[in-house]
Amino acid sequence: MAEGPDMISLTPGNQEQEWISANWPAATEPPSNSNPVKHQVWLVFGATGVIGRQICRMALSQGDMVMACSRNVKSVVRVPERWQERLQIQSCDVRSRQMVKESVDRTLQRWNRIDVVVACASAGVVGACEEQDEHEVRAQFETNVMGLFHVVQTTVPFLRLRGNGRYVVLSSLTGMVGTPGLGPFSGTKWAVEGLVESLAYEVAGQGCRATLVYPGTFDSDEASRSPPWRHFVIKPMTADYSGTPAEYGRRLILWLNPTRPTNVNRIGAILWELAHCRNPPLRLALGSDAVATMRDKLRHAVEEVEDWKFLYGTMDED
Ligand SMILES: NC(=O)c1ccc[n+]([C@@H]2O[C@H](COP(=O)([O-])OP(=O)(O)OC[C@H]3O[C@@H](n4cnc5c(N)ncnc54)[C@H](OP(=O)(O)O)[C@@H]3O)[C@@H](O)[C@H]2O)c1
């Protein structure tokens, strides 16, 4: 197939992807004989990113229908012919509520339903809180928080009325752990936490479920045209912050490049299975480093509360 402006890069490996069972706990009611796989309609924002592409590939390879949305849909290359009729590409900047709504409308016009909404669009700036200007901070919140808000508000009426639907929202370990050098980005991910957890409680009674996903650091795919640090802009560090904890964020992002313990193909496969679980978890850490980081953070928080609880008694006496 010739290259053109309306195709999305799903390389490498346009072959049918193997379905790798993640051994889900029975309580999640994963795809099985008693919960047979049904073909789903996926609406994916940030579809040209590393994780977004893997999710699109996995869904298409399993016979599902995919509306793939990103700003630069020209960064698209080849899709096997057998997948084309189940894939639609949509130019969408999540900061524009109107563009998000158009993506939703087109999905409904084409397939008459939406089963799974995936939020992968993300923007980040590396630099100490003091070093980032207002424009940079606002840009991160506009994409990561308001963008997600647009996605949720324009889709939830349809999922709710059908009494079925899944949200798969890519969070980050920085959404659990404040991260020097990534303060505003971390702030956006903490906002995502609050928004999605609240949403999950609001719509659970109507058959809709939401999962926050925390990938550990993972390998990139060969097709990625973006720099290893992907959606992050790395600001030059000022002398005031050189040698301080703010350098941590920079080291973390630069460390994303080489092969990492978590395999991005596997992330795509697991998230596809997640969308077929009847009882998906609210939070899902992917990768041993993600599990360890979340566990340490939560342990530390519990220990800190325990260490200081004696003060509450003093306050109660007033
Ligand atoms: N990579 C990691 O190691 C890692 C770890 C933890 C969490 N995560 C999270 O996982 C998610 C995906 O990460 P990734 O590494 O796959 O990202 P990525 O490769 O950098 O891709 C980011 C995606 O967001 C899209 N995007 C950016 N701004 C947008 C906007 N205003 N409107 C619509 N789309 C926009 C980009 O496409 P266009 O530029 O074409 O719009 C691209 O498709 C993010 O939420 C990230 O924080 C990633």
Image (cartoon, rainbow, N blue to C red):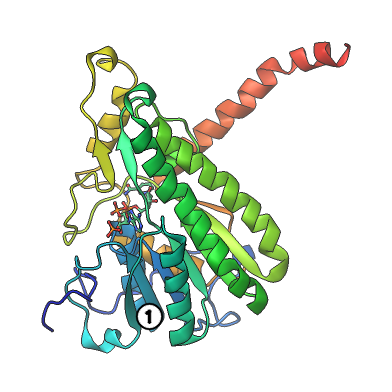
Q: Number of marks in the image?
A: 1
Which type of secondary structure does the marked residue at label 1 adopt?
loop
Does residue 261 sit above or below 54 in this rendering? above
Residue 210, position as x, y percentages in the image: 57, 60
Q: Residue at x 27, y 13 (%)?
A: 240
Examine the image and state in which quarter residue 233 appears: top left
Local crowd at mark 1 within 10 Å, few (<14), some, or many (≥20)?
some
- Left or right: residue 251 versus residue 123 is left
Tell me residue 20's x, y (percent).
Answer: 38, 69
> Is 230 located above or below residue 18 in the figure?
above
| Residue 288, image x, y percentages | 40, 44
Q: Is residue 29 left or right of residue 39?
A: right
Q: Is mark 1 within 8 Å of ligand 1?
A: no
Q: Amino acid at mark 1?
A: Gln
* Viewer-proximal residue among 258 and 111: 111
| Quarter of the C terminus within the rendering | top right
Determine the residue positioned at 86% across, 16% down.
Answer: 316
Q: Is residue 276 above or below residue 110?
A: above
Residue depicted at 66% across the width and 16% down the height? 307
Tag 1 residue = 62
The answer to whether residue 280 is visible is: no
